[in-house]
Amino acid sequence: MSSIKSGVMSVLASIRNPRLGNDLLSAGMIRELAVNPDGQVNFTFLLGKEDPATLVREARKALQAVDGVTSVKITVVDPAGPPRESHAPPGPSPPPGTAAAPPPPPSFDHIKRVIAVSSGKGGVGKSTVAANVAIALAKRGHRVGLMDADVYGPNIPRMFGMFERPTVIGGRIQPHEAHGVKLISLGFLIDRDAAAIWRGPIIMKVIQQFLGDVDWGELDLLIVDLPPGTGDAQLSLVQSITVAGALIVTTPQEMAVGDALRGARMFERVNVPVLGVIENMSGFVDPDTGKRWDLFGAGGGKRLSEELGVPLLGEIPLQPELASLADKGQPIVTTDAESPAALALSALADRVLEAATRETITLPVLNT
C-alpha cells in the first residue's frame, strides 16, 4: 500500500460519525476508494439523511492535508435514494433499467468564484452587506459582479441609484455598472410596484437567465444577493452554478440568529461551504460620548459562528446614515469611507476574499 493511500485510510479511520459512534471506514460509509499515483483521491460517501452533512466537508479538508494528496473528489450518495451531489468525472452509461444521476451544473469559466450572501430572515441588512462588500472588492482592483437574486424584494437598484432597463445586444443582456461593479436585478426589468408571485420553475428560470444570458465578461467574483430563507432561489442557484461559499448575515438578537442557523444548515446540506458569519447592527457607539448601546442585543453573531464552527468575519456597527445613504443610492463605502461602518465593511471584504480563496470549490447537484 502506498504511503499516500495509507495516509488517506488513516484519516478516514480517524473521523467519527457521532450518530453511529464509530469511524467512517468501520461504519461502511466509504465505498469505491481509489488513490491514484499522482495524488488524486476518489470515493463514494454514503451519507444518510440522519447523518451530519458536515462529515463530508470534514473528510475533504482532512484529506487535503495528507502529504501527496493533490485533489479530492467525492460522490455523496444517500443510501436510501439517488445521488444528491457529484464531483466525480463522467463514467460509463448506467446499465439498462437504472436511473442516471442528474448532470452537474453547467460550466461558467468566465466567472472564477460565486459567493452567496444569505440570511434567515429579512431586514437584517443582507443587501447592504452584499452591495458594500462588492464595491470594496472592486475598489481593490477585482472584477466583480453583483447579482440580485432576491426576486421577491430586489433592493440593489435603489442601493445603487439605478433603475433603467438594461440594453440587449446580440441577445445578451448588458449589465449596468456602478462603482466598478457590474449589476443585474429583477428590479431593472419589472415595474417597482409589480408583485412577484412566482413558483419555483419561474424562479429557477430567472436565476439561470441571470447567469447565462447576462454579458458578465470575465469576473473574479460574482456576489449573489439571495432572498431570506431557504427556498427556491437558494436551491436554484446551487443547481445552476458552482458556489464557492456562502456568507450568513444576522443581527445580534436571538430570533435572527435562530433563523440564520437554519439557512446555514441548508447550505451545509447541499455541500456548499459556509465561509463565515457577519453580524450587522452589532451596536451603536455614540460619537459624542463614546458609549456603546447594544440596541439589538449582543453576541448573537459570535454564538452562531461558534455553533457552525466557522469564523465571525465581521461586526458591522449600527450607523444612522447607513440606511439613509442606501435609500439615496449612495453606498457608504464610497460616500463616507472613513465612517465606522464603512471601515468595518471594507475590512470584511478582505476577510471574505481570503475565506473564499481558501475553500475548495465543489459541484453540488440536487434532486428536488
Image (cartoon, grey):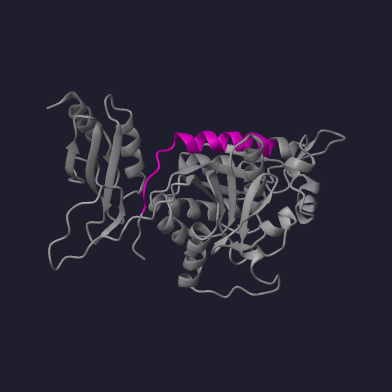
Q: Residue at x 72, y 43 (%)?
A: 294
Q: Quadrant of residue 184?
A: bottom right
Along the line of sight, the residue nearer the viewer: 327 or 280: 327
The spot of residue 56 in percent (x, y) is 32, 44
Query: Within the magenta stretch, is there residue 349?
Result: yes
Q: Which residues are magenta?
A: 344-364
Determine if residue 310 is in view: yes
| Left or right of residue 292: residue 63 | left
Q: Quadrant of the N terminus?
A: top left
The spot of residue 346 in percent (x, y) is 67, 36
Q: Is residue 59 above or below residue 3?
A: below
The spot of residue 110 in percent (x, y) is 48, 47
The spot of residue 219 in percent (x, y) is 54, 44
Q: Residue at x 50, y 36 (%)?
A: 355
Query: Within the magenta stretch, is there residue 306?
Result: no
Q: Residue furthest right?
A: 288
